[in-house]
Image (cartoon, rainbow, N blue to C red):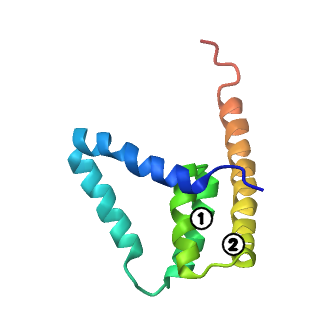
Amino acid sequence: MLLNNWTQSLTNNKKASAGFAKNNPQMMEAFKQVNLAHATPGVLDAKTRELIALAVAVTTRCDGCIAAHAAAARKAGVTEQELSEALGTAIALNAGAAYVYSLRALDALGEFAGNQA
C-alpha cells in the first residue's frame, strides 16, 4: 500500500528547489553543506544516520525529509524491521513530548490565573 508517491515527491522537491536556490543562493548553499556534513562518515555509519534521520523526519512531520532519507536508507541497507524499531522510538518520544508540553501548557495557564487582559 502506498500512502504517497515518495519517488515523485523527492523528484518534485528537487525540481521545486531551483526557484529557492535562485532567490536565496546563500541559504541553499548552507543547506547543501549541512546535508554534506550529515552524509560524511564518522563514528556513526550511514545506516544508523539514516535511521535517526527518518525518526526525526517523522517527529517533525516532514514528507520531503521522509522521501529523501527513505531513499538514502535503502541505499544504506536499512530493512523494514530496523526502521520499524527506530520509528518505535520516534513514537515513544513524540508521546513523551506531548506529555511534557501538556504539563507546560497547564503550568502556563496556572501562571496566568487571575491575570485578566
Q: Residue at x 71, y 32 (%)?
A: 110
Neighbor class of circle 1 (other Cα within 10 Å; few <14, some 14-19, many 20+) is: many
Q: Residue at x 67, y 42 (%)?
A: 104
Q: Is residue 99 left or right of residue 7?
A: right
Name the disc covering residue 54, or none.
Answer: 1
Furthest toward the bottom, the residue is 43
Q: Which residue is mark 2?
A: 83
SS assignment at label 1: helix
Name the disc covering residue 96, or none.
Answer: none
N-terminal-most mark, 1 or 2: 1
Q: Nearer the viewer, residue 74 or 29?
A: 74
Image quadrant in which you'd find residue 51? bottom right
Q: How far apart, in angstroms, are the residues tagged by discs 1 and 2?
A: 8 Å
Q: Are marks 1 and 2 in contact (CB under 8 Å)?
A: yes
Q: Report the amino acid beneath label 2.
A: Leu
Q: Nearer the viewer, residue 4 or 24?
A: 4
Q: Report the amino acid beneath label 1.
A: Leu
Q: Residue at x 72, y 48 (%)?
A: 98
Q: Is residue 45 left or right of residue 91?
A: left
SS assignment at label 2: helix
Image quadrant in which you'd find residue 108? top right
